[in-house]
Image (cartoon, rainbow, N blue to C red):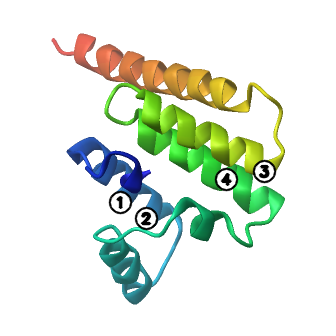
Amino acid sequence: MARVDEEITVDELAMFEQQLGKALLSPNQREVLRRSLKSPPTLEECLDGLGPEAGRLALRDAVLMAASDGSVDDDELEVLKEIAEHLGLVPDAVQQLIEWTKTGYAWMQDGYDLLNSLQG
């Protein structure tokens, strides 16, 4: 997703770091991935050799990263749809993932709001 608009926002970088943390990668592997942000591979290179499960996970993570700044712009949406099509997913796969992401972000915000309301 970094290649789409040639810009990485603070929110996108935070999401990237969060996903790295979940991946349980070694420090060297993390550094290689961070360096790749400066010259990201093409979409074709990213998709080459992805199996079905890894592809769906990659699409999910791409949606999370695209939406992390509060919206998914048209260029990002186009790339997400290309990924879904490459993987042979249902036609509305990207929209379903975007809605799931919005619901998740709203749920997290509700939790923050609840915690803030508990202050005396």
The quarter of the displayed image where residue 5 is located: top left
Quarter of the image that includes the C terminus: top left
* Residue at horizontal 40 percent and vertical 28 percent from the top: 73
Tell me, for residue 21, which label it has, or none: 2
Earlier in the chain: of badge 4 and badge 1, it is 1
Up-down relation of residue 101 to residue 83 (above or below): above
Q: Residues within 10 Å of mark 1 (few under 14, many from 20)?
A: some
User: Which residue in the rendered view is the most extreme toward the bottom?
Assistant: 28
> Which quadrant of the structure image shows residue 2?
bottom left
Separation (CA) of disc 3 from disc 2: 25 Å
Counting residues from the start of the chain, the first of labels 1 and 3 encountered is 1
Amino acid marked by disc 2: Gly
Q: Which residue is mark 1?
A: 17
Locate residue 86, reporting x and y percent: 75, 50
The type of residue carrying mark 1 is Glu
Q: Position of residue 48 (x, y in %)?
A: 69, 70
Q: Earlier in the sequence, mark 3 or mark 2?
A: 2
| Contact, mark 1 vs mark 2 (Cβ under 8 Å) | yes
Label 3 Cα neighbours within 10 Å, binned few <14 / some 14-19 / many ≥20: some
Disc 4 element: helix
The residue lying toward the viewer, choosing from 108 and 82, is 82
What residue type is disc 4 on? Leu
| Residue appearing at x 37%, y 21% in the figure | 109
